[in-house]
Image (spheres, rainbow, N blue to C red):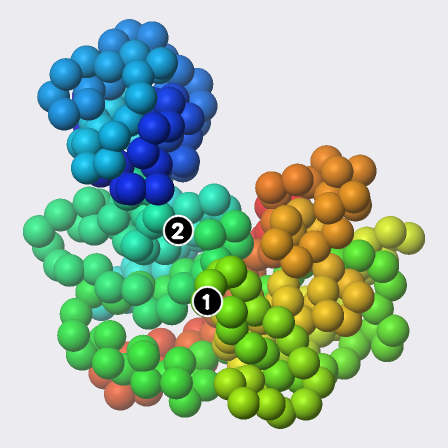
């Protein structure tokens, strides 16, 4: 029997237990949560709790189940770990006080090492995520990202036909922390960061374009916001996208954006990885 724990944050105060678990434990399928609640295998602060229980900030929730959560591992050695992050789970610092990629991979590693993230993917984005296991590897990989020695390529589904079918687009991005959004502008302005996004059309079906996107800069929500600014929002994007299209295509809450390729050129202690490319197929 496995035990999955979450500590209820302030934002979840007053939520029903079953609703909260769906947010806090995204790697547990709904049927697993339902079965655990039905079998009285969920505890709140050490006491058995049913689905209608109301959670309070600071409470510790424990789910007992034989179900084993797994994040697919694409590559692993003694220093580096590359996983295929599922959509709908945060990399770390989860707002719901529950499962994250980092917590799941640390639990998998046990006491063998302290796992660290080397970069991040948005909560609704899936795909290749790079982690490491020691201080030296962390320094090398963070420097590699800073010096753009690692190439990240994504696939996405975007509204409409791209004209031209391939291009490099440049603009400026401004963060709005209060709304957890960014906005794109065409000219340099105080607080704006330059961005460059390269895309190539793989196919167009009359409604959607499948794009291969290379991040030439890596900014918060860059692909999502930049494509929306270009009038080609990503399918399933509830933040920057076309909600009517998302409903028509039955893609509400299902962002079609996946980090599909990662090429490493870190050098230094990880020079054995130089030139290696890791790739996956997107789930859409």
**Residue 5 circle label:** none
Taking the image as drawn, is residue 14 in sight?
Answer: yes
Q: Tell me: residue 266, above or below residue 15.
A: below
**Residue 90 circle label:** 2
Residue at left offset 51%, top offset 60% = 179
Left or right placement of residue 61 versus residue 232 in this view: left
Residue at left offset 71%, top offset 51% = 235
Q: Secondary structure at mark 1?
A: loop
Taking the image as drawn, is residue 127 in sight?
Answer: no
Of tags 2 and 1, which is closer to the observer? 1
| Camera-side residue of 139 and 53 | 53
Left or right placement of residue 219 versus residue 115 in this view: right
| Camera-side residue of 57 and 90 | 57
Q: In the rendered image, which quarter is residue 132 located in?
A: bottom left
> Could you tell me how far apart the alpha carbons at marks 2 and 1 are, in whole angstroms?
18 Å
Left or right placement of residue 73 versus residue 192 in this view: left
Q: Secondary structure at mark 2?
A: loop
Residue at left offset 77%, top offset 71% = 230
Estimate the x, y position of residue 173 in percent, counting from the top left. Answer: 58, 78
Q: Tell me: residue 195, above or below residue 153.
A: below
Residue matched to label 1: 177
Q: In the rendered structure, are the residues bearing label 2 and label 1 in contact, judged by CB atoms less than 8 Å apart?
A: no
Estimate the x, y position of residue 126 in percent, counting from the top left. Answer: 51, 52
């Amino acid at each position: 029997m496995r035990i999955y724990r979450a500590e209820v944050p302030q934002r979840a105060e007053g939520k029903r237990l079953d609703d909260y678990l769906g947010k806090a434990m995204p790697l547990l399928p709904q049927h697993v949560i339902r079965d655990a609640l039905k079998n009285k295998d969920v505890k709140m602060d050490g006491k058995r709790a049913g689905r209608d229980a109301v959670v309070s900030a600071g409470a510790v929730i424990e789910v007992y189940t034989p179900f084993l959560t797994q994040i697919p591992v694409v590559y692993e050695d003694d220093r580096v770990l590359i996983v295929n992050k599922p959509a709908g789970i945060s990399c770390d610092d989860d707002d719901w006080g529950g499962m994250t990629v980092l917590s799941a991979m640390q639990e998998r590693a046990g006491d063998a090492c302290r796992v660290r993230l080397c970069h991040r993917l948005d909560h609704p984005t899936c795909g290749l995520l790079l982690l490491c296991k020691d201080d030296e590897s962390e320094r090398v990989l963070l420097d590699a990202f800073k010096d753009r020695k690692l190439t990240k390529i994504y696939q996405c589904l975007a509204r409409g036909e791209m004209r031209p079918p391939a291009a490099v687009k440049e603009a400026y991005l401004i963060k709005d922390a209060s709304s957890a959004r960014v906005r794109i502008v065409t000219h340099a302005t105080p607080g704006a960061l330059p961005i460059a996004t390269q895309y190539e059309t793989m196919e167009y079906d009359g409604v959607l374009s499948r794009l291969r996107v290379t991040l030439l800069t890596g900014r918060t929500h860059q692909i999502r916001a930049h494509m929306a600014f270009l009038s080609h929002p990503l399918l399933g994007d509830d933040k920057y996208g076309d909600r009517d299209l998302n409903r028509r295509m039955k893609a509400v809450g299902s962002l079609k954006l996946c980090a599909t390729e990662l090429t490493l050129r870190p050098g230094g202690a990880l020079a054995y990885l130089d030139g290696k490319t890791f790739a996956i197929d997107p789930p859409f």
